Image (cartoon, helix red, strand yellow):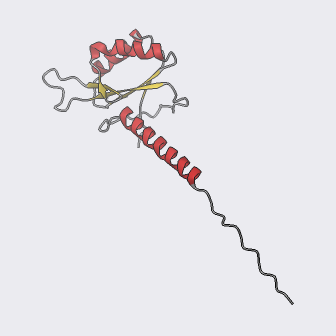
Amino acid sequence: MKIRGIKPMQDTHVNVTPLIDIIMCLIIFFLLVGHIAKAASVKGIKIPSAKNGRDMRDKSDQLIINLVPPVGGYGDNAVPSILIWSNQIPESELAGYLRKQKSENPKMKVVLRADRSIPYKFVAPVLISCAQARIASIHFMTRRPG
């Protein structure tokens, strides 16, 4: 009696090249998103608390303006720095910059991140620049108390 053997299986292997491509794309995506998030926000700003604040539902088309207090305090005509995407914008050029951004993106919303120690007299010129650029949607970043 002749015993039949099992037919040898063909050499099968899993092709991982597409998987590696997808993982590399995800890595690049998360690196870019992390870089953009880092450039949009500035460390060291103490966000004020507000118990009546609401969460922003639509976070698209937003431009974040950071008001950073001066390092040495407010003596000797020191003013806070205005930072957008890690670029310092002089107060005199802010309205023009915002007009240009508004022309490129008509649905633009401004989110103002100001340190809680900054007096309102330094926040007001930023709001005036937004009004001159005809930006209708301005939000103040706050945190929940506690």
Question: Can residue 70 be seen from the camera position used here?
Answer: yes
Nearest to the observer: residue 63 or residue 113: 63
Percent x, y of residue 29 = 48, 41
Percent x, y of residue 105 = 49, 18
Above or below residue 124? Residue 73 is: below
The outermost residue toward the left is 76
Asked where in the image residue 42 lies, by quadrant, the reply is top left
Quarter in which the C terminus is drawn = top left
Percent x, y of residue 4 = 81, 82
Determine the residue positioned at 39% across, 16% down.
Answer: 98
Nearest to the observer: residue 38 or residue 45: 38
Determine the residue positioned at 35% across, 13% down.
Answer: 95
The outermost residue toward the front is 2
Above or below residue 110? Residue 37 is: below
Percent x, y of residue 3 = 82, 86
Determine the residue positioned at 16% across, 20% down.
Answer: 77
Question: Can residue 144 be seen from the camera position used here?
Answer: no
